[in-house]
Image: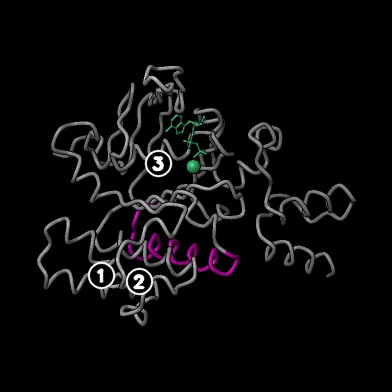
Amino acid sequence: MQKKSDQYMIETKDLVYEYNRRDENGDIAEIVRALDGVSLKVKKGDFIAVLGANGSGKSTFAKHLNGLLHPTEGVVYINGMQTDREGNVLPVRQMAGMVFQNPDNQIISGIVEEDVAFGPENLGVSTEEILLRVEESLKQVDMLPYRKHSPNRLSGGQKQRVAIAGVLAMHPQCIILDEATAMLDPAGRKKVLEIVMRLNKEEHITIILITHYMEDVTEADYIYVMKEGKIATSGTPGEVFEQKKILQDCALELPTATRIAQLLNEADIPVGDGILTMEELADRLDKLRG
Ligand code: ADP
Ligand code: MG
């Protein structure tokens, strides 16, 4: 029989994390509580967004999901595995892959396909199998034609797609993207988001998309909003975007389309509620025109 926690890709209970800030003598000068009682459950195959302003604890949370950090208090389970149990470090890292903000810090090799091979090599995967995985992973991010290229010449968005391929080559069940679109131009951002959504829909990979852009999360199944290490609110995109006061307290801005829709409603042009994208806004305006 499966343990109950196996139903969830991610489960955190009362997660607390404290950084020790040290002075020049190496003595602890200050304790920073970056996570303060985070409890949540993510079902397998879900597309989850974590939204929050700078310093709200998003990256600290992300690093708990693939065992880069271990809780000060509380527990984190990844697919039923407690992350700070001995022997779980590698399985957790293989299960939940991470893509970071800066594409330049993630690419280590001089050739795209070697870079993608790096993860599975470290897992001890056979050479034959690695070749297959590299090809399959590069295909999934539409980067196969670049397999022999030098990553240096790629755009930021292309580099992030190579980083995603590197994670895919480890056959993860979950991918965590920590502000992975923040440094990209709009086209690069759109493409990376499209690929991530496709991996979720077609490959059923659980996605945790961490961002401070509300525009990026309109397609999420569920959103958690973080503030000062706590979950300030959560819900579907429609539910969360209606909570104007809380979003303001969390220093988050509504998607442009939602803001325009609210202004139009106030100006007695009744486009209605729950508008998240420019396409939806255009549709409603079209309907109004009759
Ligand atoms: P976010 O990713 O949302 O910007 P972080 O998780 O990076 O938030 O940071 C949460 C809090 O923890 C902030 O107050 C930050 O200053 C603090 N913090 C982050 N990393 C460290 C560190 N290595 N040492 C001390 N404090 C840190
Ligand atoms: Mg961060």
- Magenta span: 185-206
Residue closest to the eye, 42 or 185: 185
Q: Label 3: few (<14), some or many (≥20) within 10 Å?
A: many
Give the residue at mark 3.
62
Residue drawn where x is 72% and y is 67% of the image = 283
Q: Label 2: few (<14), some or many (≥20) within 10 Å?
A: some
Q: Earlier in the sequence, mark 2 or mark 1?
A: 1
Residue 177 x/y as whole percent: 43, 52
Residue 236 x/y as whole percent: 55, 45
Residue 109 figure quarter: bottom left
Q: Is residue 226 left or right of residue 86?
A: right
Magenta stretch holds residue 191: yes
- The residues bearing labels 2 and 3 have C-alpha atoms spaced at a distance of 24 Å
**Disc 3 residue type (three-letter):** Ala
Report the number of numbered marks: 3
Residue 151 x/y as whole percent: 38, 71
**Tag 1's secondary structure?**
helix
**Tag 3's secondary structure?**
helix
